[in-house]
Amino acid sequence: MSRLEQGQGLADDFDLLDGHWDLTDRLSLAFREADLPPFSADRPAFSLSGGERMKALLCGAFVSGADYLLLDEPTNHLDRQGREWLYHQLESWQGGALIASHDRELLTRMPKIIELTPTALRSYGGNYDEYQRQRMAEQQAARAALEHAVTDRRRTRARMQKEHDAAQRRSAQTLRTVDTLNIASFERVKYKGAAKERPGALRRQHREQNSSLNAAVQQARERIEDDNPVMFTLPGSEVAAGKQVLVVESLQLDHAPAAPLNWRIDGPMRIALKGPNGCGKTTLLKTLLGLEQAASGDVRLSVSAAYLDQHLTQLDLSLSVMAHLSLEDTPLDEGLLRTRLAQLQLGADKVTLPLSALSGGERLKAALACVLWRREPAQLLLLDEPTNHLDLALTQAIESALAAFPGAMLVVSHDEAFLQGLKLTHSLAWRETGWHFSLL
């Protein structure tokens, strides 16, 4: 279109724009509805924020006139307002869509869920809530099947033991009887051989049955998901009620609301830090830890704290998790450490690999282990979008582990389902007039 407007168009340009002469106007309208600032179409994508890039891509998809959309984690990098915009766009979309997402709020708006596992692709009618109900029913049935398989194995083994004992008695009786019979030697040998063979044949039959029973129990057990949350914490992470954790006085950031922040954390408060992208949430977290300088004001931190962002910038990716824990002077001996890491699905084949060789979820688990299993475990966690780029199963596992954390917590996330699962007690929300602290 730009070439045509400049009088430099080619014949193919007319074909490409056929039926789309209003594309610029439609795209501009889509940008405004997405609350994107006006920018030219030739602006480099790297100059946009993550949220702006995602919105721009989605706007292009929605005005494309496509029959079907394929969206991969479309809520990544979107703040609360951006997610609401996306939900509205999808609800009004007339075409088809296949969406890969771990955003449970988005999934509850979907009329159908397809689950991809290492062995199968399974379809569930209804939204995510209905999917959970069906999965729960499947798990209940799987547990019942396991219980039945275990009971059947126990009863069958008892029956086989009785059969074995009876066969042994019959064999012994036959051998004794044969010795009293007035028969030829070769017949006596034949009868004794048969008497000894029958228990052996029964044992072989029982071994085959026992193998089948064990296989049935193992198959039934494999259908059951492990829903036990992993305990990350050590006793030193606990914060007593009323203990001073953090005091902030007249804190003013370079890019923040006009009113300074006066605020404190006492005891094991669990606080959601809320606000749109670009309002200074990450800057505030880093300032509280002394990683960035405030324009003015004072911060007093009274406990050991740890900061985890979505990029895990505090990790040296060239080192292994075992090397990191060694640097942190963990009080756990190597055997217990390896056992705990194995419970996090970080087995012997992974704990000595450089972190660069691990997945994003594995790195996050390693990072949590490092800050909570160190000599001085963190009593205050500052989490900045920790579940970005994690799949749903791992998000829920991390959610369960953090819900059991006995210390204080300040977390940034636009995933409302994740926040609700953390058992939050307070909210610190950005307003144009200042930060607003409230009880949930």
Image (cartoon, rainbow, N blue to C red):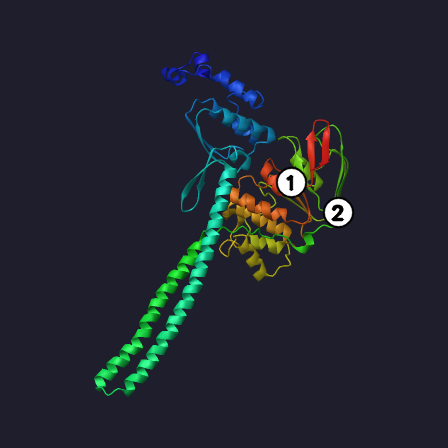
- Quarter-of-image position of residue 75: top right
Identity of the residue drawn at 57% across and 48% down? 365
Q: Which residue is mark 2?
A: 302
Identified at 63% across, 42% down, the residue is: 383
Q: CA distance from mark 2 to mark 1?
A: 18 Å
Q: Nearer the viewer, residue 358 or 267?
A: 267
Classed neighbour count for the residue bearing mark 2: other residues with Cα under 10 Å, few (<14), some (14–19), many (≥20): some
Q: Nearer the viewer, residue 198 or 54?
A: 198
* Kind of residue at disc 1: Val
Horizontal side of residue 301 vs 190, given as left or right: right
- Residue 194 location, x and y as percent? 27, 77
Residue 172 is marked as none
Q: Of the residues shown, which amino acid type is indicated by label 2?
A: Ser
Quadrant location of the C terminus in the rendered image: top right
Residue at screen point 58% across, 22% down: 37
Local SS, label 1: strand
Q: Residue under label 1, please give it.
A: 411
Residue 5 at least partly seen? yes
Residue 147 to residue 273: above or below: below
Label 2 residue SS: loop
Looking at the rendering, which quadrant does residue 152 occupy?
bottom left
